[in-house]
Every structure is written in C-alpha cells, then in structure tokens.
C-alpha cells in the first residue's frame, strides 16, 4: 500500500485514474480527502461494505469524525492528529501512526477499527485506511474479563486489585502526601441465606451486594470480590481519613437496606476493616493483612460498622 501511494506522486492524470481503480478493488477499507481542506472525494467498495456509507454520506473529514466516532475524546484525538499533520510545509508522503477507533456504521452498530493513513502532499490528498479488528477486540475483552474479573459479580478479582495498586503507586506524585485505603467488607448474616433459600438465591444476593458497593464508592475507586461473601475496596487518592470513613458509612447504609430475592426479604449487614497507606503498610499485601486484622476485631464485637487497623503497642 505505501509503495503504491508513494508512486502516486509521479503519476500523470491517466495513471491517477488507474490508481483510483486499483484502490477501489483493494480488500482494505479506505477513503481519501483533499489537503488541507479535508473534503472527502472517494471511498472504496470495501469501505462501503464495512460501514455502509458512500462518499456522498460525509462531505468532509470533520463531519465524518463528528458523526461516526463514538466518544468526544476519540473525536478530539482524531481532529488534533489530522490538524497537526496538515500544518506547515510538506512534500512527499507521510505515514500516519495507527489509531484505534470505534466507528458507528450506517445501521447504527459499531465496529472497532485500526485507523491508519498517508498524506500525499505533492498531489494534495490524504488517504485513510480502516482495518476491522472488532472480533479481535472482543476476544481480548473476553480474555481480560477471565483474567481480571470475578465471574459471579463481575467485580475485580485479586489480580485486578494488584494491577490497580501497581498503577496507583507508579503515578507521579509526592509519596509523602499520597493516601490510599484498603477496605475489607465481610457480610454479616449471609450464611442463613444459602442455608434457607439455597445457593442460587445466595448468588443473586451477592450480585446485588456488588451493585450496591459500586454505588457507594467514588468512580475512581476499585471494588473487588476476594472470595465467598468477602469484598475489598481500594480507595485511591484520599484527601484524609475522614473521606474513607464517609465511604464506610455509605457502604453500611446501603447494605442495611433489605434485599428482595425470589419473593423473600433478606436482611444482612456488613463489617469493615480499614488500613491506610502509607502508615499501615507499604505494599498491598501488608495493607490487606492489616485490614483483615481490623475486620476480625470488628466481627468479634458483633456490632457491624467499621474499624481501623491499630498497630500493637511496642
């Protein structure tokens, strides 16, 4: 493809028409537009088969971007990339680095594509190609879910928790001011649900618990299930300890509301153990261990609520 387009700069009008015919026959979806105006002049048959649009559907590249790219971030990224490439004086051919985008098709469905392109400055056109990678992305997403999700609740698993922890501590920051907390949440009174209503009902309650936990934390926090009726919450970027306590309060309030399951009303509660980074541990394993110790003390009290880890007196 690149070699073919490189030669386009040398072609006369007749050869350029031949190039048009060749590109129309290629199995790769592509379009081209004028530089620097961005008027779309051509899409090939593979493009029409993939997306359902022809060259009359979108008069300009900007219109294409605004109408078919799924998110505002993708739209802005594409605009900035094309604008940067068009600016200044250029000659010859310039290749565009790959960009992954979701494209809305004419029938309303979305296809995930690997977007590449070339700018042929001497003849004033930009060529964009689109490789359909939807099936590959679907397979990757499935594999990621298997690796990083609890299969019952679709919450994070231990591997995802460790991955998120490493990402948080790797972010540039003043480590003296970085505060995070680990919350271990253990359900109170859950065993009778399985014993009296059966495990299918118990699983349904666990899914509802997962949903309420998600709703109780900030969008930057991670909620996971670490086994049975025990859950974990990683609170990232805390301003102070009172912020963690406010989230614990929301969790307790959310889980104290009765659950409706298979015609029965289920009442459970939760006990929470909390450890704070960095004073209660320098790594995730230490924080999990200390949060578990705090949870154990809270469970022994039988009162529910939450408890902070307290290091033994020297």
Image (tube, rainbow, N blue to C red):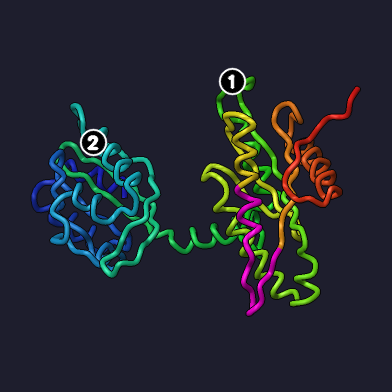
* Residue 289 locus on image (x, y percent): 81, 40
Residue 213 lies, in percent from the top left, at 61, 54
**Residue 253, percent from left and from top:** 62, 53
* Residue under pointer 1: 174
How packed mark 2 is, by other alpha carbons closer than 10 Å (few <14, some 14-19, many 20 or more), is few
Disc 1 residue crowd, few under 14, some 14–19, many 20+, Cα 10 Å: few
Q: Quadrant of the C terminus?
A: top right
Q: Which residue is label 2 attached to?
A: 83
Mark 1 vs mark 2, foreground winner is 1
The magenta stretch spans which residues?
Answer: 250-267
> Picture quarter containing residue 307?
top right
Question: In this picture, is 77 found above or below 224?
Answer: above
Please tell me which residue is depicted at 18% across the width and 63% down the height of the picture.
54
In this rendering, the count of numbered labels is 2
Residue 297 at what x, y percent from top left? 84, 43
- SS of the residue under disc 2: helix
In the picture, the disc for residue 80 is: none
- Helix, strand, or loop for circle 1? loop
Q: Is residue 50 left or right of residue 295?
A: left
Residue 131: image quadrant is bottom left
| Image point (27%, 49%), residue name | 128
> Which residue is farthest front?
303
């Amino acid at each position: 493809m690149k070699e073919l387009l490189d030669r386009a700069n040398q072609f006369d009008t007749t050869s350029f028409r031949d190039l048009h015919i060749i590109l129309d026959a290629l199995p790769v979806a592509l379009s081209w537009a004028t530089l620097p105006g961005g008027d779309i002049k051509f899409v090939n048959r593979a493009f029409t088969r993939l997306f359902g649009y022809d060259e009359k559907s979108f008069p300009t590249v900007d219109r294409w971007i605004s109408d078919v790219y799924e998110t505002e971030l993708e739209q802005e990224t594409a605009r900035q990339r094309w604008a940067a490439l068009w600016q200044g004086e250029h000659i010859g051919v310039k290749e565009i680095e790959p960009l992954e985008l979701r494209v809305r098709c004419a029938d309303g469905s979305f296809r995930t594509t690997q977007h590449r392109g070339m700018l042929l400055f001497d003849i004033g056109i930009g060529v964009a190609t689109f490789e359909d990678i939807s099936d590959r992305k679907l397979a990757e997403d499935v594999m990621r879910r298997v690796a990083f999700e609890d299969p019952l609740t679709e919450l994070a698993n231990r591997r995802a928790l460790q991955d998120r922890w490493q990402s948080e501590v790797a972010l540039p920051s003043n480590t003296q001011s970085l505060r995070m907390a680990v919350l271990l949440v253990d359900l109170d009174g859950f065993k009778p649900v399985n014993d009296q209503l059966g495990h299918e009902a118990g699983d349904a309650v666990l899914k509802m618990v997962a949903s309420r936990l998600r709703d109780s934390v900030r969008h930057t926090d991670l909620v996971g299930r670490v086994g049975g009726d025990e859950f974990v919450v990683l609170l990232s970027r805390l301003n102070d300890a009172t912020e963690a306590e406010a989230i614990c309060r929301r969790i307790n309030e959310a889980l104290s509301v009765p659950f409706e399951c298979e015609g029965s009303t289920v009442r459970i509660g939760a006990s929470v153990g909390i450890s704070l980074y960095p004073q209660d541990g320098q790594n995730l394993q230490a924080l999990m261990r200390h949060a578990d110790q705090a949870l154990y003390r809270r469970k022994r009290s039988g009162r529910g609520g939450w408890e902070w880890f307290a290091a033994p007196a020297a």
